[in-house]
Amino acid sequence: MLVFSINISENEILFLASISQKLKMNKLVLNYFKKFFVLLGLLFLILGLSENLSAQKVRLRAQINPDCGSSSNAKFSDIYADGNIAVQGGFDCRGAFIYDISNPDSPRLAAWYNPGNNQRFLEAIVIGNRGYFGSGSGGGGVHIVDLTNPYAPVFLGVVNSTKGNGHNAIHEMLIWGDYLIENSNVFSNKIIKVINISNPANPVFVRDINPTEAQWVHAMHIRGNRMFTSGWGNSANRGRTEIYDISNIGTQAPTLLGFIEDTTSITAGNNAHSSWTSEDGNYLYSCRETNNGNGDVRVYDIRNPAQPLLVNRISQQDLGLNAVTPHNPVVMGNYLYVAWYQAGLQVFDLTEPNAPKRVGQYDTFQPAFFETAKPTQLTDEPWDFVCGIASLQNNLPTTFDGNWAVYPFLGQDKVLVGDLANGLLILDVSRVNAPLKNQISDFDGDGRTDFSVYTPSTGVWQLENSSNNASNAFQFGLSTDKLATGDYDGDGKSDYAVWRDSEGVWYIWGSTVGFRAIQFGTRGDVPVAADYDADGKTDIAVWRPSSGIWYILQSTLGFRAFNWGINGDTAFTGDYEGDGKADLVIYRPSNGTWYVLQSSSSLPLYQQFGISTDKPLSGDFDGDGKSDFAVYRPAEGNWYWLNSKNNSLSVYNFGLAEDLPIPADYNGDGRAEVAVFRPSDNTWYRLDISNFAYTARVFGQNGDVPSPTSVQP
Ligand SMILES: [Ca+2]
Ligand SMILES: [Ca+2]
Ligand SMILES: [Ca+2]
Ligand SMILES: [Ca+2]
């Protein structure tokens, strides 16, 4: 059990005293600070007045997952797009998929190009009205198809061993001007072929490129006149990523300018999978694909291609990911996008190009953890204790599942990602460096939580917009309803919502879409509405204490159920890895332990923090975009939380036993404030921890319930 010791230094007291003088506090405030001095067990006091928010927010716009009759975990492969057409290769699905994405919020399957002969078109490219589908197996070579009408593709020609002297089985390919540049899907064939396809019906062989790599080239990337070939290596030879000048590829052989070979940590192999340059061509981001947990993204300074320098290495351990390996890197603008298998899309800011900083992620792989066993008897393993899955604290995956490809070139608001099992997803990454939306009772959408109360006896909500102090009253609900505010219609403004336990019905008044009533759940369920699929819309969800099962109606990704927690636990939500998706949070009063099933591929968290009489809290107190473990201890009026940023403990004495803790971001600084609602005097007491500003405000009448409470367990 964590022990909160009293440990406040004289300097800290003096500091607090000087702050309090500056604030010219009234008697009430001074009383608070007096309690502060007497009771405060202050181990660490976090002061961060102007820190940068590293809020991670990638928003799901849509998903389309065509049914091809396969139940494989590897149905789809590469993606590409131009204008309103996206194409996706088929793995076990066979063929290739052509999507109409003219409405990125509602993509449509325009056609499944599947000409038979078991063609597994791993590669799919669309440029203008022309599609190129490269067969990895089935011997079909590259099909060139007219997509003027994407709903009715027209075959124009093929490149294979008899037409253009191409490979029959393709692993990767590029279209560069008039040229098709392709490698082989035969791992012992390292030859790269260049074929002129300006007339699709009559492809003309140009040349073979025979790299110095010993085994096989996995993928090619071109920037300007330079081509980068990712060499796989073998048990006797390191892989080589070669840099070629291909300026005159139509008339002369490419010039080898240099190559990358890891001479330090790798003695053989290397599995260089694919690479992409920064837009200025000065850095190369190279993914190594392995299934032993050692795959990584390596950053090379290639300003002198004859002497590339390894300047950084990003492993999934660095990022806290639980995936087999990174897969494909792509640079667009100032961002590096990496399709990272079970960890989904990882987005990095390249402001410092030699030190990519992760700013967002979207896991396409669902579920992150499979239920492999039914609950059994309680054991000393906390994982078993929660849901009986002995292997939940699992090893790194060793299979290739999840996010395979990313295509960011339609713009940050339309980043396409391809998942092996889940088809095409369209993501909005444009707000990846912007502050997170305030999800707690922000009815006017200005980022600040508003004063808002509900009067159960009349069903009337009263609120005051933080943006202009305008008051609103709205009748919506019955006396027995539980408040369930959230942004269900995704317009950035909180909506009036209640959960009616007696009927199992959600009543929602969306600020944009108006009234909805949805039956979901049953008597005795606990409402746990939150945004589980990160599409910006709060999802209806309940936790059933009798079975420990979460039932979630995701607004874009649909229904999901998961067993997490047991009867007697407290269920609520938070976002502990900061991916914008709600995590399943269980607090067990009997042992003061938190069990968090994170939404992405990160391992589940468990943390002992609190005692049986504590109220667990959901909030981001240090403003890093991640929830912190936090409790309110009513008997002492103490707040305790662990800052996720640096794992330090913060302790504040603020409140009385009767108070309802309502931490939320009232001042818009990106951090939750310490705040309570006192039922006996209808007063909102608040301490802004960034500057110790204190406020007290009467808002509400006797018997009212503050609406921010609805997000607290
Ligand atoms: Ca507001
Ligand atoms: Ca809304
Ligand atoms: Ca949602
Ligand atoms: Ca999350």
Image: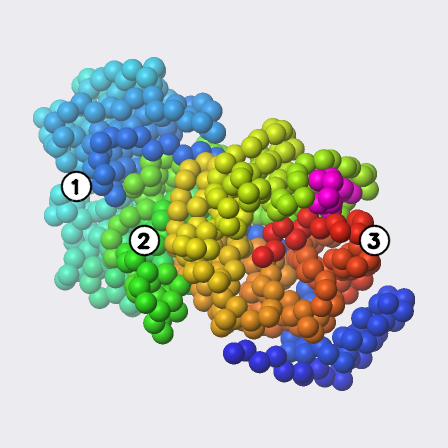
Residue 410 visible in rendering: yes
Tell whether 182 sits left or right of 25: left
Q: Looking at the picture, how far across and down is residue 678, in whole percent?
A: 76, 59
Tell whether 343 sits left or right of 429: left
Q: Residues within 10 Å of mark 3 (few under 14, many from 20)?
A: few
Q: Residues within 10 Å of mark 2 (few under 14, many from 20)?
A: few
Taking 161 as reference, is 622 above or below it? below
Disc number placed over residue 185 in the picture, else none: 1
**In the foreground, 458 or 393:** 458
Taking 471 as reference, is 19 above or below it? below
- The numbered mark, 1 or 3, whose residue comes first in the sequence reads 1
Mark 3 near ligand 1 (CB under 8 Å)?
Answer: no
**Identity, as a three-letter code, of the amino acid under mark 2:** Phe
Q: Name the image quarter holding the C terminus.
A: bottom right
Q: Looking at the picture, how far across and down is residue 225, in whole percent?
A: 35, 38
Residue occupying the far left of the picture: 162
Write the start and end of the magenta stretch as one range: 453-464
- Find disc 3 in the rendering and name its residue: 698
- Find disc 2 in the rendering and name its residue: 370
**Identity, as a three-letter code, of the amino acid under mark 3:** Val
Tell whether 712 sits left or right of 691: left
**In the foreground, 636 or 694:** 636
Mark 2 near ligand 4 (CB under 8 Å)?
Answer: no
| 463 falls in the magenta region | yes
- The numbered mark, 2 or 1, whose residue comes first in the sequence reads 1
Q: SS at mark 1?
A: loop
Residue 538 visible in rendering: no
Residue at 52% x, 78% y is 1
Residue at 24% x, 30% y is 68
User: Mark 3 touching mark 2, by CB under 8 A?
Assistant: no
Q: Which colour assignment does the render follow?
A: rainbow
Q: Residues within 10 Å of mark 1 (few under 14, many from 20)?
A: many
